[in-house]
Amino acid sequence: MTGQLPALQVAVPLLCAPLCVLLRSRLVAWLLFLVAALASLTCAVWLAERVDRTGALQYAMGDWQAPYGIEFVVNGFNTPVLLLVSLSAVVVAVYSRRSVAAELDARRTPLLYACLCLTLAGLLGLAITGDVFNAFVFLEISSLSTYTMIAMGRRRQALLASFRYLVIGTIGATFLLIGIGLAYAVTGTLNMADLAQRLTGGHDNRALQAAVVFVFVGLAVKMAVFPLHAWLPAAYGEAPSAVSTFVAATGTKVAIYVFCRFAFTVFGASLVFGSMPIDRIGLILACLGILAGSAAACFQDDLRYVLAWSSVAQVGYIVAGVSLATTVGVSAAYLYMIMHSVTKAALFAIAGLLLLRLGSVRLTDLAGLGRRMPWTFAAFVVAGLGLVGVPPTAGFVSKWALVTALVERDQWPVLVAMLAGSLLALVYVGRVVEVAWFREPPDGPEPLRPPASMVAAIWFLVLLSVYFGIDASLPAHLADAAAEALLGKGGG
Amino acid sequence: MIASHYVYWTFFALMLIGLYVVISHGNLLKKLIGLALFQGGVFLFYIGLGKRDGGSAPIISDDVETYSHPLPQVLILTAIVVGVATLAVGLALAARIFEAYGTVEEDEVLERDSTEGVTAHDRERTAEQDGGGS
């Protein structure tokens, strides 16, 4: 039974999705999503523990041996991603019951849970697969269900946001498909380990270089790296709260993992960062993304758009870590990924709670409400300080790790951009805090009471971010193991 | 180079035409048509990779010596399914946008959002959803 865990990791949420649609009951659909999330968390914890003890696991799908069959691989580099995605799913499952009930009509609710299950299955599959074409299919499963969920947003703007994401996202995924096709034409294999083996020489092959470019441009769209980020703000800003919480915590992070996987264990660091200037391009785009994203966040008048633009900037920090292509840099990027995921999920969850209680999260409508709802805004302040990187929050630990990695490689310009980005983060978080705490409260009716399940999910995330800020040994251990697994073999 | 690889050049031209249509047109349906062309070009590129001179369809038979490579065809079968699903979601969204705005031109949609005020339509749409319409 435990031998089948890698398959069950993906199969359980995938099977729950059609059941949600067939049974058509809100409660049953929610329960199925909760079960899928809990089952994947159990699998992920079990697998992580096994990998930590005995090393990498390989699972041949349907007993067709690699490189002919599709292979699932669990190793240090993807256990943090599996844990992150399934933990976010459990928290969102707890959070979503009341949030979705308030934002969507009853008829669409089971469909939303079906899409959440599909997204979960797609993201987990993307993280666990060892086959490049399979990765494309899982990417499309998670993307298509995400487009659908974004379109279920409260306002009609959600429709155009979703359509634009669909067009840009499909172009990105198709670029990935072209890149995979070119790599396949050069090597004749689709298995990641096999590809890496056959690509050790031949760095001057033009088709191979084109493959690298197509794969990375395609993934950059999904990661929302700076000039390809245009879909993100509206998509996160208009989606239903539970969806933006889940997608903000996981979507871009899994794409970044796939980027690392392709760069270090498929094409190899010597090709990607040696013969080709992907590292320099990555660092420049990371700096631009940090500055542009943070600056744009300062000028938004809707809380969810502030958070979405901040996500564009945060992707920049992670890309900077990966682009260093050192063990310390990649470890810092993983740590940043985990910490930012927890922090940003907490912030989007708080925005969703405010939306539920007030009906709007425009900054003008939040004036003075810090005194009316001290606990909700206290959670916002703690998570917001995490975004700025103030100790003792998770944001500080991850930024410190990134600074160490940058100093080690003498990347001073990036460090300056990072500092500027953190100051701008202080501005946009400070703006919200100023509006909420230091303005006169309006004379309105009392805001609605917050549902206990949503409050529990928010405080779990906020306290987790503070806990990781004080004792970061668990995420740091996972991040180090990931960097070691990525750079230790193959790429070097 | 161009002469011997003319098939690939044709496919890349098809991809570029599709991409150009997506970028240059504001009509949402035309964008989807461009997207389908772009994906179609990529599908043909894969099929082209597996073709061998004089190779027949990869169905085992006694009097056939050379076969085309079946794997790219299988991959593209999957990718076509993905493409159809994408197109279906895209068309459904375009239909919903037409219901909500009365147009499928991107600039007109944006114009209506900026001029007609956001809040009035929010209420309308929420009411419509509560009533179980569409």
Image (cartoon, coloured by chain):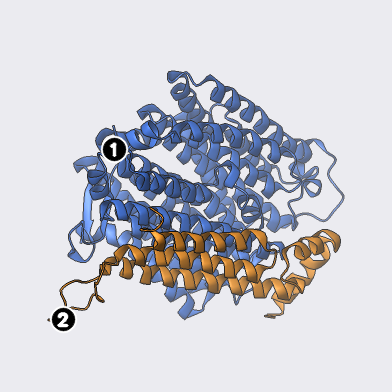
| Residue A405 showing in the rendered view | yes
- In the displayed structure, would residue A145 be above or below residue A484? below
Decide if residue A184 is on the left or right side of residue B110.
left
Q: In the structure shown, which secondary structural element does the residue marked by tag 1 occupy?
A: helix
Chain under callout 1:
A
Same-chain status of marks 1 and 2: no
Q: Is any part of residue A478 visible from this angle?
A: no
Q: What hue does chain B carry in this figure?
A: orange
- Marks counted in the figure total 2
* Residue type pointed to by label 2: Ser
- Picture coordinates of residue A246, whole percent (x, y): 52, 54
For image coordinates 34% across by 36% down, the residue present is A271
What residue is pinned by disc 1? A485
Q: Secondary structure at mark 2?
A: loop
Reply above or below: A439 against A443: above
Mark 2 lies on residue: B61
Toward the left, the furthest residue is B62
Q: Please rate how many residues cluster around mark 2, counting C-alpha atoms within 10 Å: few if below 14, some from 14 to 19, many from 20.
A: few
Question: Which quadrant, please, contains the N terminus of chain A?
Answer: bottom left
**Colour applied to chain A:** blue
| Discs 1/2, front | 2
Counting from the top left corner in percent of width and height, residue B13 is at: 50, 60
Q: Amino acid at mark 1?
A: Ala
Question: In the displayed structure, does residue A234 sit left or right of residue B60?
Answer: right
